[in-house]
Every structure is written in C-alpha cells, then in structure tokens.
C-alpha cells in the first residue's frame, strides 16, 4: 500500500497538538489513516475517513463494548474516527481533519505495470500513458534474444517507474549477490526473487539495504504473509496460473488483500499472471495495488466494437459534408 506522511499542527481543545500522521491508501473510503497523536501524555489513534458526499457517517453498532466503539464526527466530506475514543468528543477533531493532507488521487488508483520485455510493446503502451512500471521474468527476457542487462536498461530509458528484474540464483548468497548487481544498474530496478526459503532470506537482507524486492511465484496466502514479514516491497500472486490448475486465482488475491489489510501490511499486492480483461476488473474490484498486464490484455481493455462502429460512421458522414 502506498504511504506518505503529513505533519499535523492543529488546536486540540485549547492546546496546540502536533503529530506525524502516516497516510495510507487503505480502502476507497478509508484514504487517510492517522498515526499516534498526542494530547498531553495520552496517545490516540486517529483514522480519517473520506466518505462520499450525501452518505451519512455511521457510528458503529451500540452493541459493541463502549471501549471498542468508534466515534465519527462529520466535517464536510471528511470524517474523523477515533479508534481509541477520548473521554468526550472534541470540536478540535474537526479542525484536525480539515488540516490533514488531502489524499493524492494516485493513491486510490490501481497502478498498471506491463508484463513484458518486448521494447516495442512497452513503447506502445507507454505512449498512451498507461505504464506505471514493468515486470519481466527470465522467460520474457529469453523471448527477446538479448542479454538481460541490455534489455532492462533500455526499458529503464522508456519507463520511469519500478522495473522488476529477476535473479537466476536459487541460493541465498547467489540471490543477494545478483540482487545487489541488478539494483546497481538503475535506481528504478526492483529485484524479483522467487518465493522459496532462500529467497526470503535474500529479501530480508536486500530490504535492509534499501533495495526494493518483488517476491514472485506466490500461490498461497501464507506465502504472501511470509514474504511481507521478510520485507518484500511487492508480492506477486500468479492468478492465471492458479486458474490453470482449476484453482481460484481471485480467491487467492482476495485472501492476501484481506490479510494485508487486517495487519496494515505495507507490501504492495501486485496481481500477476493476468490473462484477460475480467481478471483486471476483478483485481480492481478487490483493490489490488498493482496489476501487471501483458500488452495483449492492455489492448483488450481498450477495444470496444461500438467505438469502432461509431467512429466508422462518423468518418463516413464527415465524407458527405461539403468542403468549404
Ligand atoms: C509476473 O511478474 C510474471 O512475469 C507474469 O505475470 C507471469 O505470467 P504468466 O503466468 O502468464 O507467465
């Protein structure tokens, strides 16, 4: 999940309160999550919600124990929710939410990566402004018939975003060595590591060194949990390959997203092995952070027969219009 930080400076009651708030894109209605704010010595956990205009703020069911109940105070279309409720509502809460950073639109947008090493495909999709990043793997690199470094660096010239490059070693030392080497090629390179025990050790080491990782070949929620614990920047559940063996790729994605949300895990969920437009729609509905799409699927998303028929008719009619 994406995060950014904002500094709060707001009156709380009659006192000045300052605190650092971590801002996360957690859920469409849950755009800002407060960190610990301090009112005197009493820390409070704040969550700020943005609720669509017209929809009323709903306090949680009264059947819950009072100490667990959440209180929501409306303020325009922004609401403050206190998770560890103070003794009594304070108007200062409203002032506070008004001064929170406004969530950036991109924090609520699923990022699109292109899943290819084909330079023409990347250029084509990038020219439409559709590519936030690129994922490659050894099979995709092999298709180009060129060395990994040469292709990867050319991709980095085209797309200014995360570019996943995969290690080939399968032992800890080899993966760390290769990971450091890959990361040294370009600041945007994300080291792709297979989800095996040695891989998680490598992820742990590389993430401690500030090197971004994309843990690949994920096929279970437990694997995803472990990858996150090891410090993965991205986890790549392979939806299509689960479907290929009569499994439910989307169920896997849903479970990973639920687990990560339950524990505020920051590892981004990258829906991979996407085979058709419905995969994309479902991944968007579930709230995946990223979907990596083959060029063919990007074109399928774009295509609509009524667009083509409509355009053809407009052009035919335009041809009948007298020229000045
Ligand atoms: C992801 O990073 C992989 O490169 C890719 O999505 C695998 O897709 P496939 O199962 O269609 O090969």
Image (tube, helix red, strand yellow):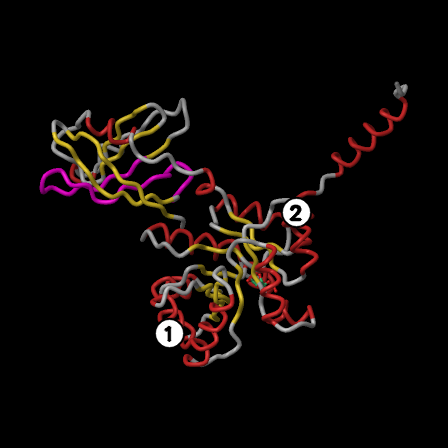
Q: Quadrant of ligand 1?
A: bottom right
Q: Residue at x 89, y 21 (%)?
A: 323
x and y, in percent, of residue 305 in the image = 76, 38
Residue under label 1, please give it. 201
The answer to which image quadrant residue 316 occupies is top right
Q: Nearer the viewer, mark 1 or mark 2?
A: 2
Comparing 82 with 148, the one in front is 148
The Cα–Cα distance between marks 1 and 2, rounded to whole angstroms, is 38 Å
SS label for mark 2:
helix
x and y, in percent, of residue 304 in the image = 72, 39
Q: Residue at x 49, y 59 (%)?
A: 188
Query: Which quarter of the figure is the C terminus placed in?
Result: top right
Residue under label 2, please give it. 127
Q: Residue at x 52, y 48 (%)?
A: 111
Which region is colored magenta?
26-48
The answer to which image quadrant residue 6 occupies is top left
Instruction: Say which label, 1 or 2, has the lower sequence index.
Output: 2
């Amino acid at each position: 999940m994406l995060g950014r930080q904002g500094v709060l400076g707001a009156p709380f009651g009659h006192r000045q309160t300052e605190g650092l708030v971590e801002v996360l894109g957690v859920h469409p209605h849950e755009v800002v999550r407060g960190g610990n704010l301090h009112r005197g010595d009493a820390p409070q956990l704040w969550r700020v919600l943005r609720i669509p205009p017209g929809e009323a703020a709903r306090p949680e069911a009264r059947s819950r124990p009072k100490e667990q109940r959440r209180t929501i105070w409306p303020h325009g279309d922004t609401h403050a929710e206190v998770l560890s409720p103070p003794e009594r509502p304070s108007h200062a809460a409203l002032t506070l939410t008004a001064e929170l950073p406004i969530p950036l639109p991109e924090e609520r947008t699923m990022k699109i990566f292109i899943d290819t090493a084909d330079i023409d495909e990347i250029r084509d999709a990038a020219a439409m402004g559709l590519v936030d990043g690129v994922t490659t793997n050894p099979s995709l690199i092999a298709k180009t018939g060129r060395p990994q470094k040469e292709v990867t660096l050319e991709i980095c010239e085209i797309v200014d975003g995360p570019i996943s490059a995969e290690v080939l070693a399968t032992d800890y030392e080899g993966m760390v060595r290769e990971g450091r080497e890959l990361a040294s090629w370009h600041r945007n390179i994300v080291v792709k590591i297979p989800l095996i025990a040695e891989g998680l050790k490598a992820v742990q080491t590389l993430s401690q060194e500030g090197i971004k990782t994309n843990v690949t070949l994920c096929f279970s929620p437990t694997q995803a949990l472990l990858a996150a614990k090891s410090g993965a920047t991205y986890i790549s559940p392979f939806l299509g390959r689960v479907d290929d063996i009569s499994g439910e790729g989307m169920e896997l994605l849903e479970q990973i997203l639920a687990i990560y949300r339950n524990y505020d895990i920051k590892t981004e969920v990258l829906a991979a092995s996407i085979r058709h437009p419905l995969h994309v729609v479902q991944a968007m509905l579930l709230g995946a952070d990223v979907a990596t799409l083959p060029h063919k699927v990007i074109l399928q998303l774009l295509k609509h027969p009524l667009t083509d028929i409509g355009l053809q008719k407009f052009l035919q009619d335009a041809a009948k219009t007298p020229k000045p």
